[in-house]
Image: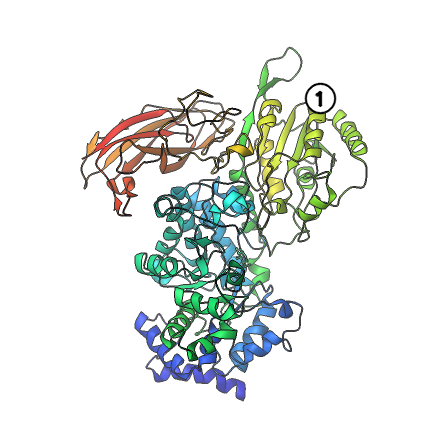
Amino acid sequence: MKKIFKRTSLLMAATFMGIATMQAQKSPQDMDRFIDALMKKMTVEEKIGQLNLPVTGEITTGQAKSSDVAKKIEQGLVGGLFNLKGVSKIRDVQKLAVENSRLGIPLLFGMDVIHGYETIFPIPLGLSCTWDMAAIEKSARIAAIEASADGISWTFSPMVDISRDPRWGRVSEGSGEDPFLGGAIAKAMVYGYQGTNLSDQMKRNDEIMACVKHFALYGAGEAGRDYNTVDMSRNRMFNEYMYPYEAAIEAGVGSVMASFNEIDGVPATANKWLMTDVLRKQWGFKGFVVTDFTGISEMIEHGIGDLQTVSARALNAGIDMDMVSEGFAGTLKKSITQGKVSMKTLDAACRRILEAKYKLGLFDNPYKYCDQNRPARDIFTKEHRDAARKIASESFVLLKNSSLPKQPGSPATPVLPLEKKGTVAVIGPLGNTRSNMPGTWSVAARLNDYPSLYEGLKEMMAGKVNITYAKGSNLISDAAYEERATLFGRSLNRDNRTDKEMLEEALKVAAGADVIIAALGESSEMSGESSSRTELAIPDVQRTLLETLLKTGKPVVLTLFTGRPLTLTWEQKNVPAILNVWFGGSEAAYAIGDVLFGDVNPSGKLTMTFPKNVGQIPLFYNHKNTGRPLKEGKWFEKFRSNYLDVDNAPLYPFGYGLSYTTFQYSDIALSTPTMDQNGSITAVVTVTNTGKRDGAEVVQLYIHDLVGSITRPVRELKGFEKIFLRAGESKTVSFKITPELLRFYDYDLNHVAESGEFDIFIGGSSQAKKTARLTLK
Ligand code: NOJ
């Protein structure tokens, strides 16, 4: 009886306020009235409770009913939980909140659903290399369908931190170095999770709330060391880093996660300028802000106060929900009594959490995401896996594909694609590992259910190609390093044999093969959170293995697993073919097979520069010219901006990626060379597939503002279109250039399009040569 009363009382409050049914479409006024009525009944403790997102450890170990967290839920002291997996478990916990707490307010269930749920897509950096917004949106849509089927209402994605430093392991979770592309991807992800129509996002039970993170500038930590200090000018922030967060907000993202780093000496979590002036006042964000994990208590370590002080600072800055620290839960009441935090501020934060729950429809139906029939129907389905396989194959970047004679004296042909015959040896520590296929930050992955590369190729090529395997080497010679790099059940089962014994086995397997696929690179946990590296070469023992394999004289295809740009200068020089497959997700093995054997023509283009060596970092395409630029094509000139020991150029530039076919670009035709502040110009090119295979090309538009009131980058991406061309086919691609596209933040941070001349470049990478000049009057 008690339980029914609790639930009914909430519904009655709504009915009393004149809401006939809780199911129908409701206006913002309906929401306000509902929340007003509810908040009138809430005690200060219950309001603070809504801001509390505690650690769920106890519940995940199955103690739900008797755990400390469970008690807090019943007392109305918890607003949500995260990373709890399984619809039955979530339903049970939701029941505690809805039936056993005084006001029956439902909980949010969050999870790091970063690049898929059980059907896993490529790591986000890989996904971004598809440059295919429809595919990226689809990946998020499928992730939302699967997560929502398992009880999840909220994902901590998209991660949109721009980064120019591949030493930082979390570049794997983002979309690379460009804010224009990053913004487009941020929008696609939010639409995928929440729905595309801003007026009715999150209404369906297979749409979930997104959380854009990590606000802000988390990708700019000094020296690429995770969690490190950030310091940058406002000018750089707004011109080069902020847009992807803003784009997510334009797409209606329901929540924002604060970053761990400081900005202007104040941690983002306590930074009022960031969380209130920029986020809410300037950008009009209406959702709620959650801390990243122990972001509040970490401010004690940052050295800006004790738990009570930092909790009050966070709330006053504009943080609404405290993940894990329990600083709000433990200290806010005292701060209110002491006048350090006002009731008004607490109410505003509490309201934002309740609004999110309301928008998700949890007050209508707290079990909206707890349909126990859905997991079997909606998770890891054939349809989802087929989509993941296709998208994974689009994410791979062909870095090199030179031609070799098949037999001595015969004409040289490209190493890839491989013929479906003979014997192909898969050799390398990444060649036969299931748990490393999905890639970092795949918390819901079924680690043992995805085929390894060897297994996948064997299955696909049965009856056609004899696929053989040898491990060849461990991941890294240093066992302790390997252990640090293979956490969370992603072990590579370190081999106890000597390096020599492993090499000998590899050579034996190689001897029987026509072609060698060298499956090398990083383990999945060598990138991701807390996985910064100072050396970005393929690890020692693997390089030795690669050298040994090359000495056999057989064609070697380096099939590179990595979560970040690596330094591949030696490989580029010595290995005939390199296919970068990132971490492609649950279907990666099949997708790699599709590309290696030519059923899919690779079309991925890099979204992050590959440097020649670590010393060049940060290296990015949209840099400034400086007052002493090095002349094009030069290596070193005294008193110019350059190095004595390496040239300035990257190994592989932003936007770069090869295909099994070739594309040719016509000159650029402009509809008119000048426009005024209300005008526009169309730039048109014709792209022709000049090779023998069908293929997709990412046509990229870059702009250079020749003279500005502040210095402007040498190039900036301002448009792209992915087109598919049959062999021999031509298509025209047009880009509309408006003054809006030419805007930037000037010295005083006004968003302006200054009149003057602009060079545009169109082509297949950031080094596009076709150019035209236009003038903005
Ligand atoms: C810390 C990570 O920085 C963040 O990306 C993640 O969403 C939270 N932990 C929750 O797991």
Task: Tell me the residue at 18%/35% (across/down).
Answer: 777
Q: Position of residue 678 (x, y in %)?
A: 18, 42
- The answer to whether 280 is drawn above or below residue 660 in the figure is below
Whether residue 246 can be seen here:
yes
Residue that numbered label 1 is attached to: 551
Whether residue 601 can be seen here:
no
Q: Position of residue 339 (x, y in %)?
A: 39, 77
- The answer to whether 658 is drawn above or below residue 633 in the figure is below
29 left or right of 589 in image = left
Camera-side residue: 425 or 171?
A: 171
Task: Tell me the residue at 68%/24% (across/down).
Answer: 550
| Dot 1 crowding, Cα within 10 Å, few <14, some 14–19, many 20+ | few
Q: Amino acid at mark 1?
A: Lys
Camera-side residue: 435 or 313?
A: 313
Q: Position of residue 646 (x, y in %)?
A: 52, 25
Residue 254 is drawn in which quadrant? bottom left
Ligand 1 located in image quadrant:
bottom right
- The answer to whether 10 is drawn above or below residue 362 in the figure is below
